[in-house]
Amino acid sequence: MLTHKNNQGGRKKMQVSFVIRDAEEKRHRNGVNALQLDTVTGRLYSAGRDAIIRLWNSTQTNSHEPYIQSMEHHNDWVNDIVLCCGGRNLISASCDTTVKVWNAHKGFCMSTLRTHRDYVQALAYAKDREQVASAGLDKAIFLWDVNTLTALTASNNTVTTSSISGSKDSIYSLAMNPSGTIIVSGSTENTLRIWDPRTCNKIAKLKGHTENVKALVVSEDGTQVVSGSSDGKIKLWSIGQQRCIQTISVHSEGVWCLLMTDGFSHVISGSRDRKIVMTELRNPSNSVLICEERAPVLSMCYNIDQTGVWATTWNSDIRCWKLHKTDKLCNYSYSNSCSSINNGSGDMATATAISSSTHLAGPAQQQGGPEAMALGVSNAASTSNAGKGYEVACIKGGAAIKKYHVLNDKRFMLTRDTEENVAIYDVLKVKKVEDLGKVDFEEEVKRRSQRIYVPNWFTVDLKTGMPMIVLGQDEVDCFAAWVSAEAGLPEHAEPGSDPKVNYGSLLLQALLEHWKPAPPHHHMPGGPVELENGCDGDIRGNEYFSVPKHTPIIFSEVGGRNVCRMLVKDAAGETESALLSDTVPSWVTNVVIDRTLPKFIKLPFYLLAHPSMFKQDRSKKLDLTNQERLIANEFIQCRKVCEHVLEKVLGTDLPAGAAAAIGSSTGNSNSSQNNSQSDANSEGSQVPAEERIELLCNDVVSRRWVMESCNPMVGVRGGGRGFLCYSIDVNRPILYFLSLQAV
């Protein structure tokens, strides 16, 4: 991958992200923002909000699988794409602030342009000049020579771009004519700005819309432009006269995409109101409803013979709808209460408005038409829906995850998608564990929740429709979660061993398991120098698990741009390894390369007698003064506290070091109760400590981790004092009740 880097100054704080997904995602998992059709091969390119560009065979009629391949290198919504160089190359723009150049046939990213400082929303293409323009929320327009972009190599990786400045607001739409003599931009300024791309000078500023200009099309000769706006209006402008010559209102909500017929005679508009309408520009009263989609329409393009139009929406499906012949458009009638025409002079002429409902009349309601193409969908998709248009074909999409809940153990996560299916994911091992089907999400959360506390160590982003896990060092510390291997990784725990593991460290080591950075070169006389600690640099991964090799891993600036993206398996490559060496922040290399683990967090507490000990003598009160201050790791297990009580308080013999997890900060442990319980202790000395002592945190039995069970309810983390209280149960002399209290 070749990267065009702008002078960005000092690097910001870095974060690491990865996506939990299948090895090959053949279906879009979210809305589709843009379409491009190769009219020679019939290949359809779709740009998804799941950050993936997919390639389909739109001409297949006998196969249920039109999918060809995926093009992956973005890590956020792909907002726009253009095919260029006769279909050999594809240019894409994304919310990750980059513009990418692709080999369209082989599906790999050739270079990445990082000139924009914010979301890149729109692209425009001048076919005759092989020139592409990009624009976005940073208000800037950049012009690119496609031949230069496609000729970039490892040694020739510098590209010069022309910039057009002057826009005062974020740009959402962009258009050029084929000869590249005119470029038009639409923005939240509610205006159209017209530029000469040859000189980068502004020609005109056209006012008339009252909301964001979302769609633009320029005529081939560069004399006219059609615009669609969030105000629901379609306007035809004369560039020479610098005025609006027609206003069309056939939608009840914003117009988000436009498509022109040959000769610039008819406009096909897609809207937030879910409708696709064809309108004659010279006679706007001749309008026909092509279809009513299931969701707001985001983009459109013609099918290969221009008898239909492919359309995308907020949903993940891509549908093809039959078009009506323009010379017979007057045989159809489209009525909508909002339909109106403006001749540009300000006089409004109301179009036919029979009722407030939208309908098709005439031939559009007749059954029949071309045979529907079966594109990964059942026959039901090809049936004609009276009043809703004729669906010719459908490329089915997948479900997007829209809701999640991280369980208390901070390892597993429940999700629910747009089809109401619930699944459980293992964040630590980067995989889906189980599909639970259409079950009650909230009930499943309650059923799987445990009374334990593990600190938050990651965040979740569902913007692309797939779970993206973010690890960082800002608000949420990815090294915050220390657990015992027995409790946190029970499937890998060994009897008699109780190592402590850090979730964040284990995961980072697994994600970069295949990365082998070049060792530092030491030129010293007398032969090679042995590395410190005898390390040869081959210690990679962790001793417990590996993650799927197809997992995308992304390094990015916190709140900023993407710096590096690759698959886990690709880190072994020489080029990728060098890129990682320049990218990976020190807090990651500390645990992955140097194997320096973060320090444990120590918490203080006091061991006291529980008030239940004084039931027979109410005059006695707990004396909280002169109590010994104990210290333990925040992830200490109940078993360790039980062992401490038996050994230090009751004086029971335990294996050497059994209760070493708890230490004293002032001297010997409190043993004031030892004599009264010595006989009982000897009777149960062979019984495990956790079966002889019962712990309660806030009057709730805690069986695994003391601090993790009680931490949210006490002020220990904020500097308060935690108290573990115990009492003797007269019915079971060896049973103690302890509770953690804050004072």
Image (cartoon, grey):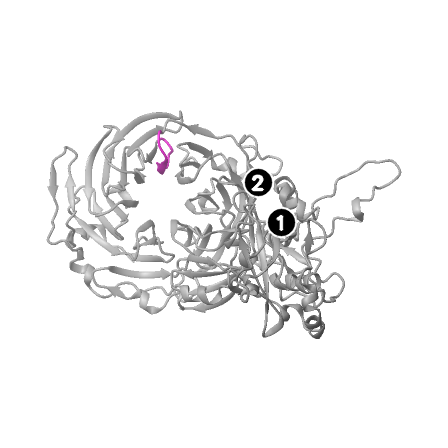
Which tag is nearer the camera, tag 1 or tag 2?
A: 1
Residue 346: x and y in percent read 14, 34
Residue 329 is one of the magenta-drawn residues? no
Residue 563: x and y in percent read 55, 41
Residue 629: x and y in percent read 64, 51
| Mark 1: amino acid | Ile
> Residue at label 2?
2
User: What's the magenta region?
Assistant: 168-181
Residue 22: x and y in percent read 52, 60
Number of numbered markers: 2
The quarter holding residue 502 reads bottom right
| Vertical relation: 7 (above or below) 655 | above
> Residue at label 1?
601
Q: Residues within 10 Å of mark 1 (few under 14, many from 20)?
A: few
| Mark 2: amino acid | Leu
Q: Which sits in the foreground, 380 or 417? A: 417
Q: Which sits in the foreground, 22 or 491? A: 491
Marks 1 and 2 in Cβ contact (< 8 Å)? no
Q: Is 41 displayed left or right of 289 in the figure?
A: right
Q: Earlier in the sequence, mark 1 or mark 2?
A: 2
Dot 2 falls on a residue whose secondary structure is strand
| Vertical relation: 441 (above or below) 289 | below
Q: Residues within 10 Å of mark 2 (few under 14, many from 20)?
A: some
Q: Which sits in the foreground, 204 or 487? A: 487
